[in-house]
Amino acid sequence: MKQKVFRKKVTATFLFSVVATFLLIIHGLFFDLDASQISRLSVEGFVATFILVFIGLLILEWIFDIEEHDEIVAMRKRIVKLEKKK
């Protein structure tokens, strides 16, 4: 069960990274570059942007899950205590 949830989170983060990468590149094209510089686009640039976005999102997810993780650990300890009392 735990691995399924983790796999779903990573898959969702991966898909969001792909979409965010396209959006970041398009944003850079239309707002920061001249139309003549469109020829500078490359697969390597896409891959580099994707890797940075994906790693950034994984770090953000980890940061926001820290509090939840601590709460789950505390709940497990309480459950173990209750089961021992039975």
Image (cartoon, rainbow, N blue to C red):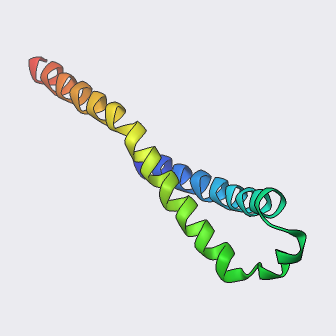
Q: x%, y% of residue 2?
A: 41, 46
Farthest left residue in view: 85
Q: What residue is drawn where x is 54% and y is 60%?
A: 54
Q: x%, y% of residue 84?
A: 10, 24
What is the quadrant of the C terminus in the image?
top left
Question: In the visual, does 64 lie left or right of 32?
Answer: left
Question: In the visual, does 65 lie left or right of 57?
Answer: left
Question: In the visual, does 73 lie left or right of 39?
Answer: left
Q: What residue is drawn where x is 46% and y is 45%?
A: 61
State whether residue 76 is above or below residue 58: above
Q: Quadrant of residue 11?
A: bottom right
Q: What residue is drawn where x is 68% and y is 73%?
A: 46
Q: x%, y% of residue 83?
A: 17, 23
State whether residue 44 is above or below residue 17: below
- From this viewpoint, is residue 1 visible? no
Q: What residue is drawn where x is 89% and y is 70%?
A: 35
